[in-house]
Every structure is written in C-alpha cells, then in structure tokens.
Image (cartoon, rainbow, N blue to C red):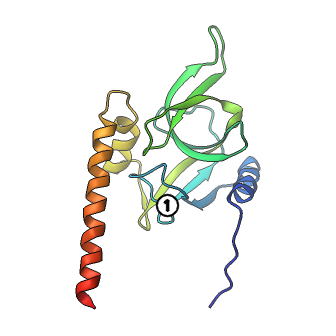
Amino acid sequence: MRNAHQVDTEEYLKAVSALIAEGREVTVPVRGGSMNPFLADNRDCVLLVPVPERLRRGDIVLFRRSSGQYVLHRIVAVRRSRPGGHEPVYFMRGDAQEMTEGPVARAQVRALAARVMRQGRWLTDRDLRVLFFRHLWCRRYFPRRAALAVYRLVRRITADRTADNLQDSR
C-alpha cells in the first residue's frame, strides 16, 4: 500500500496558481460540490491554463476570493468595473449554487479551465453537456432551482437503489 499524504488544498492551489502564472498548464482534481451536477468532487478533473485576453460568460475559472480562498466557479456575467471603465469585472456562481458572487476583479482570476475530464473522459467543446452548462445553465432565466431539485432527487433515488442492491448481494 502506498503512503498517502494529506495536502492542504489552499497551499496546493497556491502552488498550482504559481505554475500557471509561469505559463504552464496543470490538470487538477475537482474538490467540493459547488460545481455539481456538471463536475463532481473527487471524480472529475479540469485542465487549468493561463488566463486568456478575454473571458466570457460560461467560462469556468479558478479565482481567489478577497479572503484568500481559491474557488473554481463559472462566470455568469461580465461587466465594466465602473461607468467609462475599461477593466472588466466578473460575477461567479457554482453550478450547484443559487447565489451569485461578485464583482470579482480580473486580477483575482488565476486560471481558465480550458478542458474538463468527466468520469475519466476528456470532453470536447462540442459535447452537449459542455454546451448546456456553458450557454443555458448560467442564464438568469434558466429554472436552476427546479433543475437542481430534480438532480438531487435522482441522485437520492439512485443512491438508495445502489444501497439496496448492495444489501441484496450480501
């Protein structure tokens, strides 16, 4: 059995952020449930790349909150920092969340998730799941609350059936 080491997530993401600032690309596992149902904790990965010139609504980015915490969320809106200002600010939200966070300054954005590995397979930009979450899920008018309720119900039913099947096989 291999020796397992516990790594502090904040320190790990700080090191990842430094590598990306050097122009490198880094694949990292998704931690936490804020990006469900698209990305799952300890199941999926993202390829983080340096921040491009322009970020768009629907992009998944790694940013650093003013508290110092690193977060992987989706951009749901892009605005000017102030009337007549040229620097954009971003409004973020995890796919499993209802609250929007922002404004987030461009300087707080550390990386763009250029690709997503879901259930062990890299998804293309033309994958229907990618298109759905990029273009529809982050829209204000999309019925997220109802969709999340259905998603959670299906997960609960599936988990119950899995538990029943495990008991039956014993």
Q: Pick out the residue farthest to the top.
A: 84
**How many numbered marks, from 0 up?**
1
Is residue 44 shown left or right of residue 19? Answer: left
- At horizontal 60% and vertical 52% (from top left) the residue drawn is 48
36 in relation to 156, above or below = above
Q: Closer to the camera, 95 or 153?
A: 153
- Residue 134 percent location from the top left of the image: 40, 40
* Residue 111 horizontal/vertical position (percent): 64, 45
Which part of the image, by quadrant, shows the N terminus? bottom right
Instruction: Indicate the quadrant where residue 79 lies.
Output: top right
**Residue at image point 55% right, 48% down:** 113
- Asked if 157 appears above or below 128 in the picture, the reply is below
Which amino acid type is shown beneath numbered disc 1?
Asp
Helix, strand or loop under label 1: loop
Coordinates of residue 43 in the picture (x, y in percent): 47, 65
> Going 26% across and 57% down the picture, which residue do you hit?
154
- In the displayed structure, 71 sits above or below 28; it is above
Few, some or many C-alpha atoms within 10 Å of disc 1 (few <14, some 14-19, many ≥20)?
some
- The C terminus, quarter of image: bottom left
The answer to whether 155 is drawn above or below residue 140 in the figure is below
Q: Residue at x 74, y 54 (%)?
A: 19
| Residue identified by numbered label 1 | 41
Q: Position of residue 106 (x, y in %)?
A: 66, 31
Task: Name the one closer to the observer, 111 or 4.
Answer: 4
